[in-house]
Amino acid sequence: MSRRVAAIDCGTNSLRLLIADVDPARHELTDVKRRMEIVRLGQGVDATGRLAPEALDRTMRMLASYAADITAAGAVAIRMVATSATRDAANAGDFTDGVQRTLGVLPEVISGREEAGLSFAGATAELAAEAAVGAEQRPEPPFLVVDIGGGSTEFVLGKSGNHAQPDEDLTAISVDIGCVRLTERHLHGDPPSPTEVAAATADIDRALDDVAAAIAVQDAQTLVGLAGSVTSLTAIALGLTTYDARRTHHARIPAATVTAVTRQLLGQTRQQRAAIGSLHPGRVDVIAAGALVLDRVMERFGFGEVVTSEHDILDGIAWSIADAGLPRWVG
């Protein structure tokens, strides 16, 4: 029997909602409603170590709107997960108290490893099913899932995205190279100067050294990219004039195209990026940094293409609410 659940993902840059009907017995998750708003909760956190009052206000006002949607849809359970910005903030208690007052539940400030596991479960369930039935041009496991967020990027390697098999072994690492963090640290020019781009690249490459030491990236057969930086780059690569998740979901973008789009974005002014019809206004100032992360990942680890997924941590959260089971960790 299916349950209507609500999953909320509060990241450094965006606040997202999924209301879905989940049937663990039939391995089905059916969307009722998805929303995404840019609230920039992590504004200035890297520099100050605190959540800005205006960022908290934006987040709580949008969360109140989400709460109204959840009530109207009749969801029977809610889980809210908060990520990098609230892990880093000295005043995280202000955020927690505000969420409880607004939504009626406590947010779960999860670790990067937990975040990666939820993302992996949400992103690869369909891909694993395609591989299992021998679909044409099917993606091959093991999958390396790369979730490029605002404050951090999660890498997780595993063979199966089947939420019904919780004994799957996964390895993962979270590194502090998110699109907001890198932009605030390095990309100040309009457009960024070559020196700024070089500094951001060096920051990313140092983090990828840690990734290579932590997980066996060379074992991965398919790179799966998640979150707004990847989906936005995909829409640009496909030449979409308006954003269309039906087109970006499971699109395969070659490495050369990722590099070309990244160079384009890094070379554009803010005004030029704002004119891209498929790009959400809230991503205009950080998309170049997010694209650079993906480009460096593909260059460093030799991936010829990336498979974009619109299904990610939200779907993993929804499955977890329905007690569908999540993969366990190695070590």
Image (cartoon, rainbow, N blue to C red):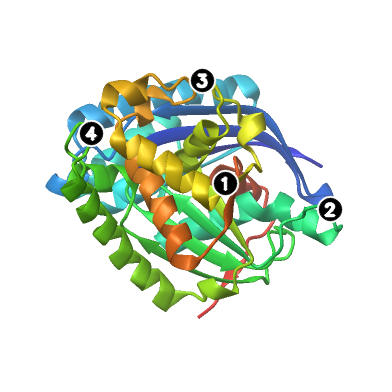
Report the side of 84 relative to 64 (left or right): left
Q: Secondary structure at mark 3?
A: helix
> Could you tell which of marks 2 and 4 lies nearer the N-terminus?
2
Q: Is residue 89 left or right of residue 39?
A: left
From the image, state whether disc 2 or disc 1 is nearer to you.
2
Quadrant holding the N terminus = top right
Q: Nearer the viewer, residue 151 or 193?
A: 193
Q: Nearer the viewer, residue 110 or 233?
A: 233
What residue occupies the far left of the structure in this picture?
48
Q: Where does the image place residue 241, in percent across and percent down from the top left?
A: 54, 20
Towards the viewer: 66 or 85 = 85
Task: Of the two numbered discs 2 and 1 on the same chain, state the one appearing first in sequence.
Answer: 2
Residue at numbered disc 4: 191
- Image coords of residue 317 (percent x, y): 57, 47
Does 33 appear above or below 295? above
Q: Position of residue 237 (x, y in %)?
A: 53, 36
| Amino acid type assigned to the residue bearing label 2 in the image | Ala
Assess disc 3: are there few (<14), some (14-19) or many (≥20) residues with their C-alpha within 10 Å of its C-alpha. Answer: few
Q: In percent of the image, x 24 and y 39: which residue is there?
A: 94
Q: CA distance from mark 2 to mark 3?
A: 40 Å
Counting residues from the start of the chain, the first of labels 3 and 4 encountered is 3
Residue 85 in sight in this render: yes
Residue 68 is marked as 3
